[in-house]
């Protein structure tokens, strides 16, 4: 299904394809936890990270190594030919000659698509500026499926819904599973109208609220994102907003017993550390689930070719 | 209506009619005709039109427009008609029509788009709607629908 195919955005996924990735990820969880595998033995994954990343870069690396493959790394852009002015197009053509697939994170929107145009091997988009980050969406879906259920879920997306790239593609993907979506954000960081109308046109119920208290008790998943300080010209205003959207054990008391709290991480102040101890907190599991989900994608893209040549 | 205009017929060249009122100078820009041209060009602006209310007309002598140039005009004047004139007679007449995708004509308005860097690529825009024009960048997916003339390459 994914053999030799690029992975650039969630728009390219049908629901069947998402289900297939999630099922494969579930079957790979024992290997993600350390069971030995040589499914991708001899395969090489190139990591081109032009921007800082902890979870995405390390979980891709872990995923590849857990499957018996290996990784090569661009390292910091300053130490590579990028510093000499090499184009991205040339870089992926060169690196595509060294590896079986390329993972790319780049600050410019559309960079992964450009890379796919020039790369001789599959390209996986690990974040292109404010554009797409499909593997994050898939691991979010996997988390919801594992910790609750995907069908007809009631989810509240909280925080920066304007610039946060993860929530846009998550909302789109959840619309394929009949989700009810509540958007909770400061007025200046509301989800763009175009995305809201796109969701509504797919039959998704979309509600907006400016306060967490308005949705208490009616939701299954609270998906919290970081509100970035730089979005606010006035630090006082930022502090006020950040405080009002902060998740604490007290704010969770009125929620459903089975409510799960997710966060793509890194968090700053959005979720108080005391929440970590509650049964609601799944964000560290969520970051772990990035490994089996990325293993599934790598396996589906790269397996079966192994050892065929020569 | 055109017979009332005091612009004489051209012998050879192209007449672009039914340009949306006020867009004639942008059409000239698309055609690469600047203020220092030595081509014979007639421009008529904001004359009454049954179809458009107001329209502009551009006549360029000794030049027959190619398909690429016609496509570009459709971006800012989707109702324009092109008349190819030889020896005072219209030998070919057609309406402008945008293809599904246009390359290297309009740059993306998103300053963070990879197509606005030094990469060895041409801009690529999908035509999502023809009239009024709605474009979407193939790379960053940002839509472009207003002030398209400002983004002509």
Image (cartoon, grey):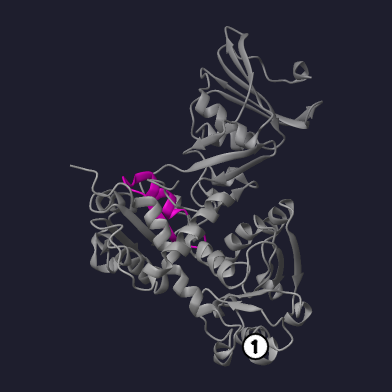
Q: Position of residue A258 (x, y in %)?
A: 67, 79
Q: Which residues are magenta?
A: A110-132
Query: Is residue A155 placed above or below A205 in the rendered structure?
Result: below
Q: Is residue A258 visible?
A: yes
Density class for disc 1 (Cα within 10 Å; few <14, some 14-19, many ≥20) is few
Pick the residue in front: A145 or A261: A145
Pick the residue in front: A59 or B82: A59
Q: Residue at x 36, y 71 (%)?
A: A58
Q: Residue at x 76, y 82 (%)?
A: A213
Label 1 chain ID? A
Residue A52: within the magenta? no
Q: Which residue is mark 1?
A: A243
Query: Is residue A272 placed above or below A285 in the rendered structure?
Result: below
Q: Position of residue A222 (x, y in %)?
A: 65, 76
Query: In the visual, does B137 lie left or right of A44?
Result: right
When asked about the image quadrant of residue A263, the answer is bottom right
């Amino acid at each position: 299904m994914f053999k030799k195919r690029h992975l650039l955005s969630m728009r390219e996924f049908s629901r069947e394809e998402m289900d297939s990735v999630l099922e494969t990820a579930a079957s790979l969880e024992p290997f993600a936890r350390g069971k030995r595998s040589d499914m991708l033995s001899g395969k090489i994954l190139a990591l081109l990270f032009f921007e800082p990343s902890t979870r995405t870069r390390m979980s891709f690396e872990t995923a590849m190594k857990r499957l018996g493959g290996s990784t090569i790394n661009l390292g910091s852009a300053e130490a590579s030919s990028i510093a000499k002015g090499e184009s991205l197009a040339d870089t992926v053509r060169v690196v595509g000659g060294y590896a079986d697939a390329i993972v790319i994170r780049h600050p410019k929107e559309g960079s992964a698509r450009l890379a796919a145009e020039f790369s001789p091997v599959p390209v996986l988009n690990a974040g292109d500026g404010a554009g797409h980050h499909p593997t994050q969406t898939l691991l979010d879906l996997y988390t919801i499926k594992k910790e609750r259920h995907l069908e007809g879920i009631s989810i509240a997306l909280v925080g920066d819904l304007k610039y946060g790239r993860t929530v846009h593609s998550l909302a789109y993907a959840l619309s394929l599973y009949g989700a009810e979506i509540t958007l909770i954000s400061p007025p200046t960081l509301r989800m763009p109208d175009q995305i809201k109308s796109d969701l509504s046109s797919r039959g998704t119920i979309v509600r907006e609220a400016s306060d967490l208290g308005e949705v208490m008790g009616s939701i299954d998943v609270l998906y919290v994102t970081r509100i970035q300080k730089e979005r606010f010209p006035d630090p006082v205003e930022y502090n006020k907003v950040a405080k009002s959207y902060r998740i604490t054990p007290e704010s969770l008391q009125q929620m459903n017993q089975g409510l799960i709290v997710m966060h793509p991480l890194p968090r700053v102040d959005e979720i108080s550390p005391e929440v970590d101890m509650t049964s609601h907190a799944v964000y560290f599991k969520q970051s772990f689930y990035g490994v089996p989900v990325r293993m599934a994608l790598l396996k589906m893209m790269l397996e079966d070719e192994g050892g065929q040549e020569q | 209506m055109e017979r009332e205009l005091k612009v004489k017929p051209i012998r050879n060249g192209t007449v672009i009619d039914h340009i949306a009122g006020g867009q004639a100078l942008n059409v000239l820009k698309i055609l690469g005709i600047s203020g220092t041209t030595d081509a014979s060009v007639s421009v008529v602006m904001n004359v009454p039109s049954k179809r458009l209310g107001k329209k502009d007309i551009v006549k360029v002598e000794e030049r027959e427009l190619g398909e690429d140039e016609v496509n570009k005009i459709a971006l800012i004047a989707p109702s324009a008609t092109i008349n190819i004139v030889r020896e005072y007679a219209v030998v070919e007449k057609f309406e402008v029509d945008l293809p599904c995708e246009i390359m290297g004509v309009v740059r993306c308005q998103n300053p963070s788009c990879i197509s606005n860097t030094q990469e060895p690529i041409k801009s690529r825009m999908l035509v999502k709607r023809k009239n009024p024009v709605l474009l979407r960048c193939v790379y960053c997916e940002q839509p472009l629908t207003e002030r398209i003339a400002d983004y002509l390459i």
